[in-house]
Amino acid sequence: MAMVMRPDTAAPQSLYTRSVNNVVFQKLGGTEDASQPFFCPDGRYVAFVANNVAHGGGIYQTYAVSRDGQRILNIQYAGDGTAAGRAGALSHAA
């Protein structure tokens, strides 16, 4: 299960996941300001949309984070409807 939560109102919302056998959600680092989460078809990544502050803000892009939170990919869409991920950091304002 994946969902966006904000346990502390002073912090930005982030992506959290948990297995169906566990009641505790785990925050996935680097997912601040995430929205619209969904699992990739193979289940290895959770994709989401976030504001890319590194490009001046206001530019929402699609990212995928590994279920252990160790790898974030920026998803790039080609004109033929295919998509590919490239490694990259998600940057947020402090």
Image (cartoon, rainbow, N blue to C red):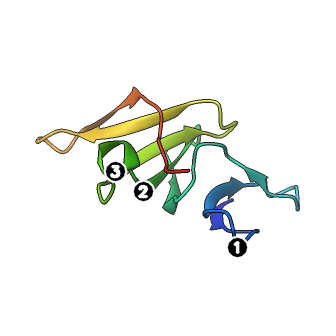
Farthest residue to the left: give it: 79
Crowding near pointer 1: few (<14 within 10 Å), some, many (20+)? few
For discs 1 and 3, the disc positioned in front in the rendered view = 1
Residue pointed to by mark 3: 61
Q: Which residue is mark 2?
A: 49
Check disc 2 and give the amino acid type.
Val
Under mark 1, the amino acid is Thr
Q: Nearer the viewer, residue 50 or 81?
A: 50
- SS for tag 2? strand
Q: Nearer the viewer, residue 20 or 94?
A: 94
Query: Mark 1 or mark 3: which comes first in sequence?
Result: 1
Q: Which residue is mark 1?
A: 9
In-image side of 83 versus 9 (left or right): left
Can residue 89 be seen here?
A: yes
Percent from the top left, x then y, of residue 67? 65, 40
Considering the numbered disc 3 on the image, is that residue within a helix, a strand or a loop? strand
